[in-house]
């Protein structure tokens, strides 16, 4: 068998643009024959994937998957360059496959996940399957992140908003799990998608954060001549009132429930109402919210220029 040298791997990578490990495996599979290795990579759909890796992938889909017993859930975000590809059926099917594997994975990081075997084709890793899809679809793609939730004392409920723009998991602890409880949890998940809370309850809010907010509010009042002249007791009351208002905005259970008939009922009160009606002990333990592309730079290009680039092979 021919020796697979670093120089040979480097040459194949430069010719095909495929990943280093993919090139090494390809050369080993064909006993170092460069031409056969190129064909092997093309057959695997890996050639050319690296050339697209420099493009910004900020569109895509956040997708959720639940176990059949409703005790486990996962949300994944898979990115592509354009909204057009994000709506492509082949892309969305692939994202579903990624979510199905992520639901069962023991990996704790995306890097670990990318290095494990692809369940639907164990000859590839998850990362190599991603490279293959990049070549097939023709855009850079990334498996950006995933998060899992497990609840043995209740259920996990999911919600996908706007076809994958937002994916939500809600962890519900309950001694009763029926259609009413699941519907309540789904409504809470929709609340999370719509109003973007940072915390489940005010108990999760860091004390240092609250102290800093109070300092900022005090400084704002002191810089306002009209408010600065008020008695200290009044000023302290103003600060606490503003802190409470902020907590109602950032804490899920304190937020006004979006479907409340009177517009005043809190999420906590809604959960308690459903629990009472079902003679159940229910609490919202937590949630995960992924918004596709949040924190990523989105590349804006003239469509004609993009077409010209693609025709030029860039």
Image (cartoon, grey):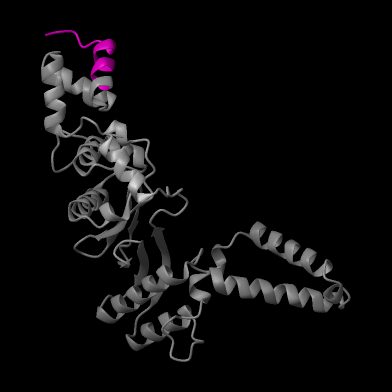
Q: Residue at x 44, y 54 (%)?
A: 294
In the picture shown, does residue 34 fall above or below 39? above
Q: Residue at x 16, y 42 (%)?
A: 119
Whether the magenta-drawn stretch holds residue 302 is answered as: no
Span shown in magenta = 1-13
In the picture shown, does residue 192 fall above or below 89? below
Q: Quadrant of residue 287?
A: bottom left
Q: How many marks?
A: 0
Where in the figure is residue 263, as x and y percent of width and height? 49, 87
Q: Quadrant of residue 151?
A: bottom left
Where in the figure is residue 259, as x and y percent of width and height? 41, 84
Q: Assign the C terminus to one quadrant of the image.
A: top left
Question: Would residue 143 be visible to someone looking at this image?
Answer: no
Where in the figure is residue 301, as x and y percent of width and height? 40, 48
* Outermost residue toward the bottom in this view: 262
Where in the figure is residue 170, as x and y percent of width and height? 37, 66
Q: Assign the N terminus to one quadrant of the image.
A: top left
In the picture shown, does residue 18 fall above or below 295? above
Whether the magenta-drawn stretch holds residue 4 is answered as: yes
Front-most of residues 125 and 53 = 53
Q: Residue at x 34, y 58 (%)?
A: 149
Is 80 displayed left or right of 297 in the figure? left
């Amino acid at each position: 068998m021919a020796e697979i040298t670093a120089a040979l791997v480097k040459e194949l990578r430069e010719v095909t643009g495929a990943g280093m490990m993919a090139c090494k495996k390809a050369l080993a599979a064909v006993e170092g024959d460069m031409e056969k290795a190129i064909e092997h990579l093309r057959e695997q759909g890996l050639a050319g994937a690296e050339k697209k890796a420099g493009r910004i992938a900020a569109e895509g889909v956040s997708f959720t998957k639940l176990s059949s017993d409703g005790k486990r859930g996962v949300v994944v975000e898979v990115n592509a360059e354009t909204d057009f590809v994000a709506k492509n059926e082949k892309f969305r099917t692939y994202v579903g496959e990624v979510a199905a594997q992520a639901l069962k994975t023991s990996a704790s990081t995306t890097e670990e996940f990318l290095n494990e075997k692809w369940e639907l084709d164990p000859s590839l890793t998850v990362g190599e399957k991603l490279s293959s899809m990049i070549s097939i679809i023709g855009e850079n793609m990334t498996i950006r992140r995933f998060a899992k939730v497990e609840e043995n004392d209740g259920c996990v409920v999911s919600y996908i908003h706007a076809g994958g723009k937002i994916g939500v998991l809600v962890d519900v602890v309950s001694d009763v799990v029926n259609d009413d409880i699941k519907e309540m949890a789904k409504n809470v998940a929709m609340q999370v998608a719509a109003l973007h809370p940072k915390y489940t309850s005010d108990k999760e809010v860091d004390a240092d954060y609250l102290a800093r907010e109070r300092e900022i509010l005090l400084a704002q009042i002191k810089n306002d001549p009209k408010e600065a002249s008020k008695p200290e007791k009044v000023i302290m009351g103003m600060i606490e009132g503003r802190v409470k208002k902020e907590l109602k905005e950032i804490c899920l259970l304190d937020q006004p429930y979006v479907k409340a008939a009177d517009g005043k009922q809190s999420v906590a009160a809604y959960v308690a109402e459903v629990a009472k009606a079902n003679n159940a002990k229910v609490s919202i333990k937590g949630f995960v919210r992924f918004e596709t592309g949040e924190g990523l730079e989105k590349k804006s290009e003239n469509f004609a220029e993009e077409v010209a680039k693609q025709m030029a092979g860039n």
